[in-house]
Amino acid sequence: MPPCPPQQGRTRTMLLPQPVGESGPTREMELAWQEIMSISELQGLDMQNENSYDTAAVYCNMSHMVPGSSYGLSQTTLDGTLPSCSQNLSIFNRHHPEVVPPECQRISAAAIPPMDPNYGSATYTCMLISSPLNQMGPTSMNQMGTKNGSMSGLLNDPMVDQLNLMDIGIAADSLMGSQACKTQEDLESDSGLSLNYSDAESMEMESIDHGRLCAEYSELYPMDYHPAQQHYHMLPSLQEMPITQNYSMLPPETSQALNSHACARNIPVGKAKQYSRIEMTCNRDERRAVAMKIPFATENIVNLPVDDFNELLSKFQLNEAQLALIRDIRRRGKNKVAAQNCRKRKLETILYLEKDLNKLRDEREKLLLDRCSFEKTICQMNQKLNDLYRDVFRMLKDKEGHPYSSEEFSLQQTVDGSIFLVPLKRENGTEWPHAPVDNSDCC
DNA sequence: CATCGATGTCATTTT
DNA sequence: GCAAAATGACATCGA
């Protein structure tokens, strides 16, 4: 059964019961998001082709957007701008958007509040203004940084140069437009057996775009996110380039991470490209977790022992949807590892059986040779025995000194080793023509 | 365009 | 009887 289309997922999501213990602002944020989605669809907004969007307006608007509201980012990136600030993740550690006033979570082109750096949604802010910054050059950028407090920290960040490399990928993704997004979506619909969508999946399909996911994920897992994140943005370019170029375009730590990842798993470098897809599919659950605001890493969800896992769950107030997603993530993660181990065992079993088969074949060949040899030896021994028999029989004489006829007598050996001369046939009613030879006749 | 290998996922079975 | 692991089957992707 094919995966549910986004519309169905949205419908189902809306039909879901109110999550237990969900806070008002969070719920309101989701409703606001659904409202945004419905407005976009009803008005037939072509977000990806709307090039005439006012950058300044977006800037101001996005500066107040919470990470959960990310449509503006798509527009901006599709404008061909070069988002450069998706990396200032360490600066803004807030993940949960609940701290942002709910009224700021709605996109309203008519009433855009002035930018408030205290909100610190700089991930979007910086990504949006990165293009003019890049065009202005370092001097202008610094000047702007002095004017804008929220940017100063970033512009002075030594990571900026490094991060610009990421922008190339992001820009490439942006320039690819909807096709790039679709490619990613296609990648996410990995298995046609995904029968039941969770809330997170619905949210992911409907409303989660690159920027938000990058930002939220990076805020949650700043150390682990880079390879997948950057490859995610690099996808269109990567597909058109040799693997060496792919790696060369990635920031050093990213290519190093990918290479080390490949090395750690004994993956030839040439296979790393395929593993990049694996990385992306692996991150699908992570994105779902982000979408559902799971407050801990999927790595822990999957790898922790049962007791530690339950202890971890008990530390957080999680609603049913979150718990369901966590259980799914844990089940999928465990099963993924189990499948990998299972395949590994299967391959090892096949190798072992092939080895065993070859060994048995060799042993069979050897046994056949031995058999031939033994049969030959038996033949020779039989020949010798016959010769010896004839010699012995020829030496036997009766009382009159005549030799026995081999057609009438034969030599027989008993269990105790005694040898008798036995007549081969006897006539009815007559006695044996000759008495059996005693041991004295035995050779 | 068909094929194959690798992988993730789900359903089912086994432990 | 239940949970976790193991496994078969299927879909997808890239080469």
Image: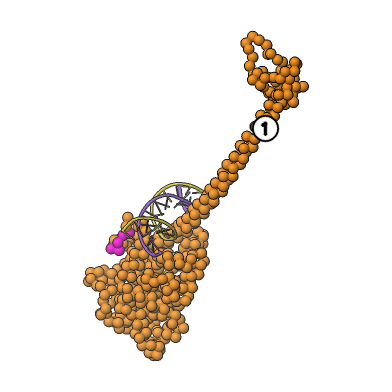
Chain colours: A orange, B yellow, C purple
Position of the N terminus of chain A, as image quadrant, is bottom left
Quadrant for residue A100, please give it.
bottom left
Predominant SS of the magenta segment: loop
Q: Where is residue A364 in the image (x, y as percent from the top left)?
A: 56, 44
Residue appearing at x 27%, y 78% in the figure: A51
Q: Where is residue A123 in the image (x, y as percent from the top left)?
A: 39, 78
Q: Is mark 1 on a helix, strand or loop?
A: helix
Judged left or right of residue A385, residue A333 is: left
Extreme residue in the top direction: A429
Position of the C terminus of chain A, as image quadrant, is top right
Residue type, label 1: Lys
Looking at the picture, tell me which residue is in the foreground, A395 or A211: A395
Magenta-drawn segment: A3-7
Extreme residue in the left direction: A43
Looking at the picture, tell me which residue is in the foreground, A309 or A425: A425
Residue appearing at x 39%, y 80% in the figure: A84
Extreme residue in the right direction: A440
Which chain's residue wears label 1?
Answer: A
Query: Is A379 above or below relative to A304?
Result: above
Query: Is A396 above or below relative to A324?
Result: above
Q: Position of residue A22 (x, y in %)?
A: 37, 66
Looking at the picture, tell me which residue is in the foreground, A311 or A365: A365
Which residue is denoted by mark 1 in the rendering? A384
Q: Where is residue A152 in the image (x, y as percent from the top left)?
A: 42, 86
Residue appearing at x 47%, y 70% in the figure: A258
Tell me if residue A210 is in the magenta stretch: no
Query: Is C13 above or below relative to A369?
Result: below
Query: In this figure, what is the number of numbered marks?
Result: 1
Query: Is A370 above or below relative to A272?
Result: above
Quadrant for residue A204, please give it.
bottom left
